Image: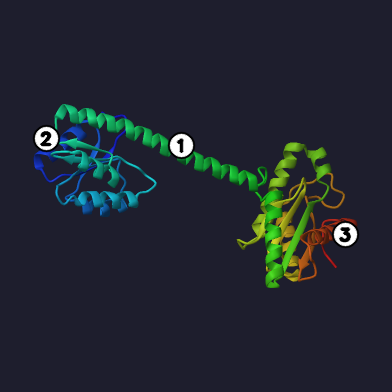
Amino acid sequence: MAMNTMQVLIIENCQATRLLVIETVVAMGHAVKQIENAQEALSYLKEHSVDLLLMAIEPPALNEFETTKALRALTPDDWFPIVFLADKVDDKLYERGIKAGGDTFWEQPINPARLQAQITAMERIDMLRKKYQAAQIGMVKLNDTLSYLSLFDELTGLANRRNFDDTLRREFKLAQREIAPLSLLICDIDFLKRYNEKHGQLAGDNCLRAVATAIASVLQRPTDLACRYGGEEFTVILPNTDASGALDISEKIRAALKKRKIPHLDSPISRYVSLSIGIASFDGQFELVAAFIKASDDALRRAKVNGRNRVEAHL
């Protein structure tokens, strides 16, 4: 029994040859699919994958070579072996077959012992091919993971600072070009340092996650982006959102966090974890994205000065 089952496709009109090949392939633990002619193989491969194709060729027409070219074009990212079965192979025929995309020729009549050895050789090729495919999939997954880690905060799952910088810069330029509104929220957890000292660092991390979840729960549009901006600071980028809409989102965020009732035993302003939020809304008045960020940060500072656990907008 083969360690690695192959899906073998055979195109052979000669019944004796076909039965011999099928018997040998099945006895070695592989699956076989029979197809009447080379053209049908094109339709079959549009819906199925194969690991080995055995194709009889019939001179002088040699339409199978044209079909082989079409097969290779159909599956450019998956090179499975194509073996031609021929009564007689000369140098010219061999060259044409290889150039068409075939890999080798097996001469007929088929020798059973040699056929088994040839199938064993194909097993080795198929095993290496599948290891390569698995490695490719592994690399894609690794790249996806690295890409995610480069753009998202590991603790909270929100976009990270790099993602924030890139997204805000892009959305700011778009808002300038299209004369469209854009709002930015900067949110700060009130007295997080005291929270950590009272409840411990692990509880502090859980608090950050809970606040991140509360913020994300309010955002409904795919273009809205919540980010972890710093230690206890979060930002929210709201494209096509004016000051009124930003204020509404801010209050909904505060309400979502309040609903969670995360105890804060050392907060001088609330029994529960709360947020101070600063809003800046762009309507053409800022020339630089840095000035836009500063406006939101100034509004946050005013929220802290005015008692925290509140929302302030840039004047």
Q: Does residue 43 sit above or below 179 in this rendering?
A: above
Q: Which mark is residue 109?
A: 2
Where does residue 266 sit, x and y in percent of width and height?
84, 44
Taking the image as drawn, is residue 241 in sight? no
* Label 3 environment density (alpha carbons within 10 Å; few <14, some 14–19, many ≥20): many
Q: Earlier in the sequence, mark 2 or mark 3?
A: 2
Does the image show residue 268?
Answer: yes
Name, please, the residue furthest toward the front: 92
Left or right? Give the position of 221 relative to 191. Answer: left
Residue depicted at x 72% and y 37%:
202
Q: What x and y, as percent, mark residue 121? A: 28, 30
Kindly give the residue lying farthest to the right in the view shown.
Answer: 305
Q: Are marks 2 and 3 in contact (CB under 8 Å)?
A: no
Residue occupied by mark 1:
135
Q: Residue type at mark 3?
A: Arg
N-terminal label among 2 and 1: 2
Q: Quadrant of residue 27?
A: top left
